[in-house]
Image (cartoon, rainbow, N blue to C red):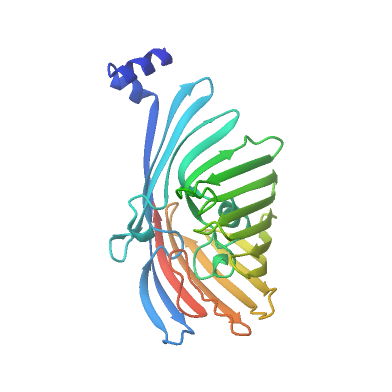
Amino acid sequence: MKKSALLFAILGGSAQAALAQSSTTVYGVADMGLVVENGSAAGSITKLTSGVGYGSRVGFRGTEDLGDGMSTKYVLEAGILMDSGASAQGGLAFGRQAYVGLTGSPGSVTLGRQYTPYYWTLLTVADPFVTGYAGTATNLMANPGRANNMALYTTPTIGGVTGELSYSFGEVAGNITASRASGGSLGYVNGPLVIKFSFNNATNATGTDNAKNLLLASAYNFGPVKLHAAYAQNKGLGTTNTQDGLIGVTVPFGASRILASYVAKNDKSGANRDAHQFGLGYIYNLSKRTELYTAYAHISNKNGATYIVGNGTELGSGNSAFNLGMRHFF
């Protein structure tokens, strides 16, 4: 019956039958907050910012059952700057995500603009601030967030173990190595324990140099508190050579949760431009979909280091920042 319906849909004979096998969901995030940044040579700044914690967005996700345990899926997700109404990600129509793929018992394959496996490890395991607010770990740690032209394979979960492999085509004529990237992750989940290792390797626009990032992250949920820890090695373009360490906690209680983390960057070069960040946040759930939040972070730079405190959308301007805002999921 499903094969017949699919055949009629292809021939244009039964649109209703095709629609009956698929589903599409519209979803989004509306996030606005007050941001106060200090420590810049230009002076402090106070502003309203979109996406302080989670980038504001509207998205479409859908699936279609192909039978025999196989299905298609797609995501089209547009970033929105709610303070101005403009598109985020440099004005791209679907700059956050845009991919299509197949999923089934052998795993899934998705194609398009997607998040790297490295970023998912930082987001879901390492960082109690989930790469948002003033305390985001990405103020000091590498953030290979999205990649264009990516083919991503995700294995099925077997005995708590799952893996990912990605390859992003550079699409530079006559130079197969230029602007390409590869990555992957291997994770293990056993009840309250999560351990995940990820890597990302990105080549520059001429194919003559590359950035290599390794990340080992873990989290353990004791119930009243969730502990986070991470260690990263970065060998970037040119002579960059750094190590990062993170420890953090998530403390849920009632309708609230407290977030805190300490991130240290160790510059292995002769300049020894180290930095340390402390972040603290508080989130209160007004309902299942609406939250109030506040956060603060400060970076101590050493030997001329110039790291700054940003948030989920902006890079920031100084070495400390305060956030106060509201977020609604729909």
x%, y% of residue 327? 41, 60
Is 240 placed above or below 17 here? below
Is 190 placed above or below 215 here? above
- The reply to whether residue 209 is visible in this rendering is yes
Instruction: Identify which residue, 116 or 38, lies in the foreground.
Output: 116
Farthest residue toward the front? 174
Instruction: Identify which residue, 65 or 228, lies in the foreground.
Output: 65
User: In which quarter of the view is residue 156 placed?
Assistant: top right
x%, y% of residue 49? 37, 69
- The reply to whether residue 330 is visible in this rendering is no
x%, y% of residue 14? 29, 17
Instruction: Identify which residue, 276 or 241, lies in the foreground.
Output: 241
Instruction: Identify which residue, 261 or 225, lies in the foreground.
Output: 261
Q: Is residue 13 left or right of residue 129?
A: left
Is 2 placed above or below 266 here? above
x%, y% of residue 106? 60, 29
Residue occupying image coordinates x 60% and y 49%: 183
Residue occupying image coordinates x 66% and y 72%: 264
Q: Quadrant of the N terminus?
A: top left
Q: How many marks?
A: 0
Is 111 placed above or below 220 here? above
Q: Is residue 131 left or right of residue 76?
A: right
